[in-house]
């Protein structure tokens, strides 16, 4: 088994990452933006896994675990913020939360 | 040594009070603030009495060195207190009158929100003033000198919410600073000559170092006179004092009548050896005093603000003291300071009680008829006014003013012109005092009395009224009775006035003349303001220009505005847009413009930030591929 | 073409299609369901790349915990039908143009780098949970501790931010009078 060329894996990671990025750029709904960020993180994790499997090392998977941890923390804080924003502004539109400007 | 060694307590107690009130006054209740503020000065006054008793039993010159202050080369001033008869008289007045005024303020300022601030400044003032008169060297004296200036500034601008009061405070501070600068140059000159600023050293070395009438002694004396004129509101620096009435009335009583403004008198009396060396300086002092007393007296006749009348009267009375100093009648000047401190403080406190009772009404022509409504204030005010007008025989003002007039005529340095100026001044003084009393207390009641002073305000009035009658008998003309306590007391410190020989015989005539002039002034006042109503309006209409001139204090304000203020503001305006400035404004402008430009990217829309990150990543990767 | 490569391509295609569906959906719940599909497909990819432990975590944590968390929040927000309408009005075709061009350029660059940069080689051997565990509690111990701290901070932060006080507005989000 395991005869997958790694550039295929990296290209898959790249495609997923681009999709997530497009989504972040086009969405105004903050929950969708959060979901898109999750997609991008996941793609980054995939790139690590691919690299790890090329060298047959555990480090790739460990990096993935750290990304996972970070994503979990980010989602919890992000969701709390979303709740507050919705509570205050009665909308999920990020453009409405634009008071912090220079 | 005896009780005198505790002299350092005298300035320390008010200082402690001030520090305590500044640090913790915000959190104290009003009774505590009042007891600290008045109590510290009261204790200080008690200490002075104890020291005074010890001093009287053993009069001497005491030097109490507290600690070395500065030691730079030859300049080694220490915190050194110097007690002799002259400074004892001053500290007695400062602490005693000061205590009475503090007591008065406890009630007078009762409603004010800046209660702790007021007492802190007042205590600090008492401390500075005590340091000034107790200083054994000129550096410490200068510290006290500036300290009282600072407190005067703080207290004139006490109600700083009104910009007018802040303006008055700045005016007082800046004008006295002109004099202070002259004085400071004088101190430099003295230090350059004597290598010391110790007063005793200078006074003992001066006669051997400088010969009589030498020009450098004249310059030094005139520079000191400049400082004295600034602080004591004498010509040509007199025009700050009427505006200084913007402060609370107890402040006017303590600082701008009884104590601080007489610091100039103290300075000249203290440095008497220096002035004796220079006849020119002496004559200048006398002429300044004479001219000041006349112009201020005439201005006082036209004022309508109760406190401004008293302010001009203060300038005029200090003019008398300068006149006395100028003719070498040192103890007469100090005697007049002594009596003036009591009766002028009394008049100001009475004025404060009236103003407070009439809803802060200052215009005397809107008062009237207060005789029946405020009887205690009336009686005490009358005592003070009689003293100010120098009502013969029964008031202290009569004796002190008579002494000055006598020396102005009979003294070796006196002259007919100075005497006539003094005599005209006496007439004017009697006239405006009569006017003040009649307009305020007699006639119709134009404003209703809203509140009557309590015991803490009337008690100081009573004590001061009694004193302003009694202290005159400490020094009676020697053809009356052998009771020359003041000049005897001061004899060890101040030289006795020299009088022309063979003139004593005329003393009776002169006293009679002075009494007649005073009574004449009172009669004119009575005639114009009471017996023939409407006459004073007629006189006013007849000479409108003269009236306006006198009302404005002879136009000194306008003159100084034209001569100094206008050019300086013009210069400031002209140099606003210079090249060097342009560079710095340019840098600031660039920074602001850059800030604006970058701040527009900070628009608060999150998608723009994400876009920024993406474009940045794209650029970096593109660069990585290309390079 | 061996089986693994076939599985890789199939699941990769599923992942891409599911992700495209995620980013084009108007309904949040639908989008999340497609997201789960995408995650599961990726888990398969992980498995065939020889990372079974990562694949398990992908299913448990990503498809399980995180997505469930987001669903909870969506339920708490209690969004109505008009949220979908709003989403539709925001996602006009014109908004796709700029981001699309940018991302296409980026993608082209990545492809160029990948294909021209000599990224070659095959995944040869599976790395199991044992090796991962050894590494985690060996050289990466400090990092594990730090991620523990990060999670702690996330918990506290979420608690603090998520408190709903009746009157007091959080100072970061305070309404200014404009």
Image (spheres, coloured by chain):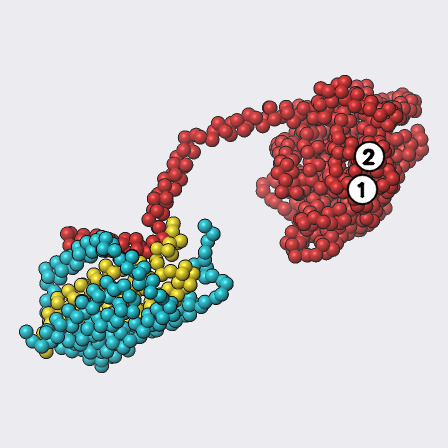
Chain colours: A yellow, B red, C cyan
Quarter of the image where one finds residue B349: top right
Q: Are marks 2 and 1 in contact (CB under 8 Å)?
A: no
Q: Any mark on residue B368, and which? A: 2
Q: Chain of mark 2?
A: B
Q: Compare residues B342 and B187 and report the one nearer the observer.
A: B342
Q: Position of residue B371 (x, y in %)?
A: 86, 38
> In the rendered image of this protein, does residue B331 appear above or below residue A16?
above
Q: Residue at x 70, y 48 (%)?
A: B112
Q: Distance of mark 2 from mark 1, alpha carbons?
A: 11 Å
Quarter where residue A74 is shown? bottom left
> From where the camera sits, is residue B123 visible?
no
Label at residue B449: 1
Q: Earlier in the sequence, mark 2 or mark 1?
A: 2
Q: Which one is nearer the viewer's eye here, B263 or B151?
A: B151
Asked which secondary structure carries label 2, the reply is loop
| Residue C161 visible in rendering | yes
Q: Residue drawn at (91%, 32%), measured in percent from left and top?
A: B393
> Residue B512 shows which numbered tag?
none
Q: Is residue B257 above or below residue B537?
A: below
The answer as to whether the residues below labels 2 and 1 share one chain is: yes
- Tell me the subunit letter for badge 1: B
Q: Position of residue C29 (x, y in %)?
A: 29, 69
Observer-nearest residue: B411 or C159?
A: C159
Secondary structure at numbered mark 1: loop
Q: Residue at x 22, y 80 (%)?
A: C129
Residue plotted at (70% across, 26% down): B553
């Amino acid at each position: 088994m395991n005869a997958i060329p790694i550039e295929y894996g990296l290209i898959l990671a790249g495609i997923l990452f681009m999709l997530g990025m497009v989504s972040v750029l086009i969405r105004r709904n903050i929950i969708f933006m959060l979901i898109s960020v999750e997609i991008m993180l996941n793609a980054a994790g995939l790139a690590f896994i691919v690299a790890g499997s090329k060298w047959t090392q555990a480090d790739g998977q460990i990096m993935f675990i750290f990304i996972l941890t970070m994503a979990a923390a980010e989602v919890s804080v992000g969701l709390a913020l979303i709740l507050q924003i919705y509570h205050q502004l009665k909308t999920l539109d990020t453009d409405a939360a634009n008071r912090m400007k220079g | 040594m005896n009780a005198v060694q505790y002299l350092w307590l005298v300035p320390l107690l008010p200082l402690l009070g001030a520090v305590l009130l500044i640090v913790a006054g915000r959190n104290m209740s009003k009774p505590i603030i009042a007891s600290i503020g008045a109590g510290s000065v009261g204790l200080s006054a008690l200490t002075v009495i104890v020291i005074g008793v010890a001093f009287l039993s053993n009069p001497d010159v005491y030097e109490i060195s507290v600690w070395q202050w500065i030691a730079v080369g030859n300049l080694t001033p220490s915190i050194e207190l110097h007690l002799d008869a002259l400074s004892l008289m001053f500290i007695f007045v400062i602490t005693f009158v000061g205590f009475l005024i503090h007591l008065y303020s406890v009630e007078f300022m009762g409603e004010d929100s800046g209660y702790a601030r007021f007492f802190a400044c007042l205590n600090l003032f008492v401390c500075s003033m005590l340091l000034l008169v107790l200083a054994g060297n000129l550096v410490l004296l200068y510290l006290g000198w500036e300290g009282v200036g600072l407190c005067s500034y703080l207290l004139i601008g006490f109600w700083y919410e009104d910009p007018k009061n802040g303006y008055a405070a700045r005016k007082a501070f800046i004008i006295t600073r002109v004099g202070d600068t002259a004085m400071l140059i004088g101190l430099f000159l003295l230090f350059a000559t004597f290598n010391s600023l110790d007063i005793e050293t200078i006074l003992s070395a001066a006669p051997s170092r400088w010969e009589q009438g030498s020009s450098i002694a004249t310059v030094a004396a005139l520079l000191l006179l400049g400082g004295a004129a600034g602080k004591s509101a004498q010509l040509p620096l007199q025009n700050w004092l009427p505006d200084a009435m913007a402060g609370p009335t107890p402040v006017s009583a303590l600082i701008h009548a009884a104590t601080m403004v007489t610091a100039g008198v103290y300075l000249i009396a203290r440095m008497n050896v220096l002035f004796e060396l220079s006849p020119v300086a002496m004559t200048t002092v006398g002429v300044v005093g004479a001219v000041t007393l006349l112009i201020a007296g005439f201005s006082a006749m036209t004022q309508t603000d109760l406190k401004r009348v008293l302010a001009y009267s203060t300038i005029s009375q200090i003019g008398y003291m300068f006149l006395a100093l100028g003719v070498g009648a040192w103890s007469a000047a100090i005697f007049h300071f002594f009596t003036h401190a009591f009766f002028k403080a009394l008049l100001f406190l009475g004025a404060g009680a009236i103003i407070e009772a009439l809803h802060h009404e200052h215009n005397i022509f809107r008062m009237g008829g207060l005789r029946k409504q405020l009887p205690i204030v009336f009686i005490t005010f009358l005592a003070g006014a009689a003293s100010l007008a120098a009502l013969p025989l029964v008031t202290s003002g009569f004796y002190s003013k008579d002494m000055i007039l006598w020396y102005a005529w009979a003294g070796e340095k006196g002259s007919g012109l100075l005497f006539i100026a003094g005599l005209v001044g006496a007439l004017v003084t009697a006239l405006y005092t009569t006017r003040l009393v009649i307009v305020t207390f007699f006639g119709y009641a134009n404003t209703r009395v809203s509140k009557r002073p309590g015991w803490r305000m009337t008690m100081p009035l009573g004590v001061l009224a009694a004193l302003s009658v009694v202290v005159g008998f400490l020094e009676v003309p020697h053809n009356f009775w052998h009771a020359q306590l003041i000049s005897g007391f001061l004899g060890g410190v101040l030289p006795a006035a020299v009088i022309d020989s063979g003139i004593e015989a005329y003393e009776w005539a002169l006293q009679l003349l002075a009494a007649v002039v005073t009574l004449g002034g009172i009669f004119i006042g009575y005639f114009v303001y009471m017996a023939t109503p409407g006459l004073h309006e007629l006189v006013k209409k007849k000479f409108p220009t003269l009236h306006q001139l006198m009302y404005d204090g002879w136009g000194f304000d306008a003159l100084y505005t034209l001569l100094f203020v206008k050019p300086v503001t013009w210069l400031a305006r002209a140099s606003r847009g210079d090249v060097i400035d342009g560079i710095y404004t340019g840098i600031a402008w660039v920074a602001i413009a850059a800030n604006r430009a970058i701040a527009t990217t900070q628009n608060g829309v999150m998608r723009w930030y994400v876009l920024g990150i993406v474009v940045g990543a794209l650029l970096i990767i593109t660069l990585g591929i290309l390079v | 073409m061996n089986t693994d490569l076939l599985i890789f391509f199939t699941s990769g295609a599923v992942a891409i299609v599911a992700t495209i569906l995620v980013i084009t959906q108007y309904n949040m719940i639908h989008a999340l369901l497609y997201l789960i599909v995408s995650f599961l497909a990726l888990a398969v990819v992980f498995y065939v790349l020889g990372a079974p432990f990562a694949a398990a975590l992908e299913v448990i944590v990503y498809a399980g915990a995180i997505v469930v968390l987001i669903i909870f929040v969506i339920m708490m927000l209690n969004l109505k039908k008009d949220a979908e309408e709003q989403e539709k009005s925001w996602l006009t075709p014109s908004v796709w143009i700029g981001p699309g061009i940018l991302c296409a350029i980026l993608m082209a660059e990545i492809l160029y780098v990948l294909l021209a940069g000599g990224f070659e080689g095959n995944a040869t051997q599976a790395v199991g949970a044992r090796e991962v565990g050894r590494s985690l509690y060996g050289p990466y111990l400090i990092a594990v501790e730090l991620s523990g701290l990060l999670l702690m901070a996330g918990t506290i932060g979420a608690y603090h931010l998520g408190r709903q006080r009746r009157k007091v507005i959080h100072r970061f989000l305070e309404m200014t009078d404009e």
